[in-house]
Amino acid sequence: NEALKAITHELTKFKWAYDELEQHQKRVYQLTEEKRLLFDRSSDMKTRISRLEEELKKQSFKVETLIQKKMKLKDDNSTITLNLNRNVLELKQKNEELERYRCTQEDLCNKLNELENTVVHLQEKIQILLFEKIEKERQLEAHKENIKKLEDLCESHETKQQELNETINKLNQLYN
């Protein structure tokens, strides 16, 4: 009976380890999916940054053109200055936006590295859990063999007990 309790306890521990393994596998899948999404977002960010850099070049060219017009067209100075100021403001805004995207891309790369480290850690833990699972299965087989031996021993003991009781009864009858 104690052996059965111990085996039941081992089976329960095995079930817990197996459940933990499944949870880790689910987490690895989730992290892999997050990693894929981050890669997609990073690619989108790179495309947007490229477009913003092109826009920045275009805006820079516009500013240069406006400066040249200012020198040529002194009569129209106030209008050109207004356009120049507007373009400079747009350029500053584009620069700020570009800087925000650069920071975001850096953050995404850092997060991606963290996720990769987490995936590696979880894969190592899965390997350990798989090894433990195999060991528990081996122990379970050994316990099953021990249970069979105990059952055979109990059956043999019961048979010998019956024979002993019959012998005692015969002796009692002869004695009486």
Image (tube, helix red, strand yellow):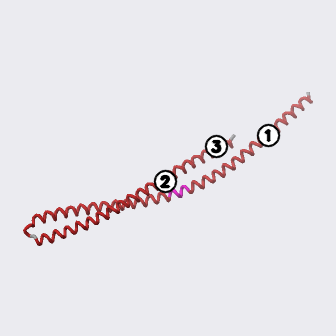
Q: CA distance from mark 3 to mark 2?
A: 31 Å
The kind of secondary structure element at disc 1 is helix
Does the CB distance between marks 3 and 2 fall below 8 Å? no
Residue kind at label 1, given as amino acid type: His
Q: Residue at x 13, y 70 (%)?
A: 69
Q: Which residues are magenta?
A: 121-126
Residue kind at label 3, given as amino acid type: Thr
Picture quarter containing residue 79?
bottom left
Q: Of callouts 3 and 2, which one flags the residue occurring earlier in the amino acid sequence?
A: 3
Read off the residue under disc 2.
29
Residue kind at label 2, given as amino acid type: Tyr
Q: Residue furthest top?
A: 176
Foreground mark, 3 or 2, reads: 2
Q: Residues within 10 Å of mark 1 (few under 14, many from 20)?
A: few
Q: CA distance from mark 2 to mark 1?
A: 54 Å
Read off the residue under disc 3.
8
Picture quarter containing residue 130?
bottom right
Considering depth in this image, is 66 or 150 the residue closer to the camera? 66
Q: Residue at x 20, y 62 (%)?
A: 89
Q: Is residue 44 left or right of residue 169?
A: left
Q: Residue at x 54, y 56 (%)?
A: 125
125 is within the stretch colored magenta: yes
Instruction: Quadrant for the C terminus, please.
Output: top right
Q: Is residue 4 left or right of residue 160?
A: left
The kind of secondary structure element at disc 3 is helix
